[in-house]
């Protein structure tokens, strides 16, 4: 992507909406044409901006969106109503909490019901309103996080009347280790889910997140629900990823200084220069989601050349060694914080986390720019 504008911010994220829609089409193309491909846009579309991302995906033909919570869902429904996409389906992983029923109905939201009590409350509310309310059912097949446990599942299979009055759109489950292709847990969860689905065989089913979408047709059922893959991150860390990178993250060069051999850099003076050096100070810090542990580990790219991050990461800035760099590029270029030699997978790995956490930790101060998506 070409040169970056920062507005008044000191770091910026450029999001390629065409890459996101291309990734959605790619995942969509992995499953049979009759199988729906949803888009998971929770947590502000993994930090990239749920309004822009969801609008682009809606234009690309996506009809089904998942968020985690009611607030996220209302924001998305409001957007869809304003942009002529009012009929798209929004499903809420965390279901409704006591007292949120009216909001779910008013904003046409579908809860993913996670236990018998929620099922019963949704039914009671449907009866009170005199309408059939839509919902999906989440069965836990090994995650022990959300969804009906084995006892509740058995009870429901024996008492299907407990679902009367609901319009059930999907039965669902979630994979524990989908990104580990050969993990036997996948096959066990698939078997458990198939068994549960056989008791609700008239209801469409879904188990695949991004990783599950890549595990093959056994995992596709009637709908897949990719998140991370849409944002260009291959869940299997495939080196030949067919996914397109969806964002860049760049920082302004705030100042360039010369420092002498023996000088120390940054808080605590933890880094000592072993030669006369040139240091560039960049406008990004841990408050922007640039993790503090990256000092001494990461590189940034300036003028296509990697520059090591030296000294501690501050709240608002970092210092990088640019000794011997082209002076013209230091004056005119910005620094790419993730780049070919230092992709987000490596950044995440270096701080002991996963790209999901880095992305959702991207700060509010960064200016976000969008291309494509028309
Ligand atoms: C977040 C989430 C997804 C999407 O997962 P990715 O790994 O980002 O594709 C799908 N299903 C559920 C239940 C989730 O919580």
Image: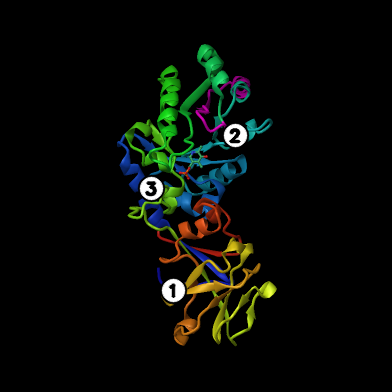
Horizontal relation, residue 85 to residue 25: left or right: right
Q: In front: 48, or 188?
A: 188
**Tag 3, which secondary structure?**
helix
Looking at the rendering, the stretch of residues picked out in magenta corresponds to 121-146
Pointers 2 and 1 in contact (C-beta within 8 Å): no
Determine the CA span between mark 3 and mark 2.
Answer: 27 Å
Say left or right for 15 vs 108.
left
Residue of label 2 = 104
Assess whether mark 2 and mark 3 are in contact (beta carbons under 8 angstroms): no
The quadrant in which residue 259 appears is bottom right
Residue at 56% in and 48% down: 43
Badge 3 crowding class, 10 Å Cα cut-off, few under 14, some 14 to 19, many 20 or more, is: many
Q: Position of residue 197 (x, y in %)?
A: 43, 22
Numbered label attached to residue 3: 1
The spot of residue 363 in percent (x, y) is 60, 60
Q: Which of marks 2 and 3 precedes in the sequence?
A: 3
Q: Residues within 10 Å of mark 2 (few under 14, many from 20)?
A: many
Q: Which mark is residue 52?
A: none
Res 24 label: 3
């Amino acid at each position: 992507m070409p040169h970056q504008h920062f507005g008044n911010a000191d770091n910026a994220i450029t999001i390629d909406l065409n890459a996101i829609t291309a990734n959605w089409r790619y995942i969509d193309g992995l499953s049979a044409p009759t199988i729906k491909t949803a888009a998971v846009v929770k947590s502000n579309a993994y930090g990239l901006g749920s309004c822009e991302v969801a609008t682009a995906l809606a234009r690309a033909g996506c009809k089904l969106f998942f968020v985690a919570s009611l607030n996220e869902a209302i924001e998305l429904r409001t957007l869809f109503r304003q942009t002529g996409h009012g009929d798209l389906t929004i499903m809420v992983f965390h279901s409704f909490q006591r007292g949120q029923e009216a909001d779910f109905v008013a904003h046409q939201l579908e809860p993913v019901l996670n236990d018998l009590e929620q099922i019963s409350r949704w039914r009671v509310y449907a009866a009170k309103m005199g309408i059939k309310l839509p919902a999906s059912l989440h069965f836990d097949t090994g995650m022990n996080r959300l969804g009906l446990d084995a006892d509740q599942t058995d009870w429901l299979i024996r008492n299907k009347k407990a679902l009367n009055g609901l319009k059930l759109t999907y039965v669902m489950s979630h994979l524990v280790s989908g990104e580990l292709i050969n993990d036997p847990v996948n096959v066990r969860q698939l078997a458990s889910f198939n068994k549960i689905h056989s008791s609700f065989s008239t209801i469409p089913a879904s188990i695949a997140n991004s990783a599950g979408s890549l595990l093959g047709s056994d995992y596709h059922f009637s709908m897949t629900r990719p998140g991370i893959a849409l944002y260009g991150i291959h869940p299997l860390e495939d080196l030949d990823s067919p996914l397109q990178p969806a964002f860049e993250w760049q920082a302004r060069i705030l100042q360039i200084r010369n420092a002498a051999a023996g000088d120390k850099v940054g808080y605590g003076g933890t880094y000592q220069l072993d030669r006369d050096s040139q240091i560039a100070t960049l406008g990004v810090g841990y408050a922007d989601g640039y993790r503090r542990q990256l000092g001494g580990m990461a590189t940034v790219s300036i003028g296509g050349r990697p520059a090591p991050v030296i000294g501690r990461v501050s709240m608002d800035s970092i210092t990088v060694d640019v000794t011997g760099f082209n002076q013209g590029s230091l004056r005119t270029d910005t620094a790419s914080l993730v780049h070919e030699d230092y992709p987000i997978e490596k950044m995440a790995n270096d701080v002991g986390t996963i790209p999901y956490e880095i992305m959702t930790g991207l700060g509010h101060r960064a200016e976000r720019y969008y291309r494509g998506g028309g």
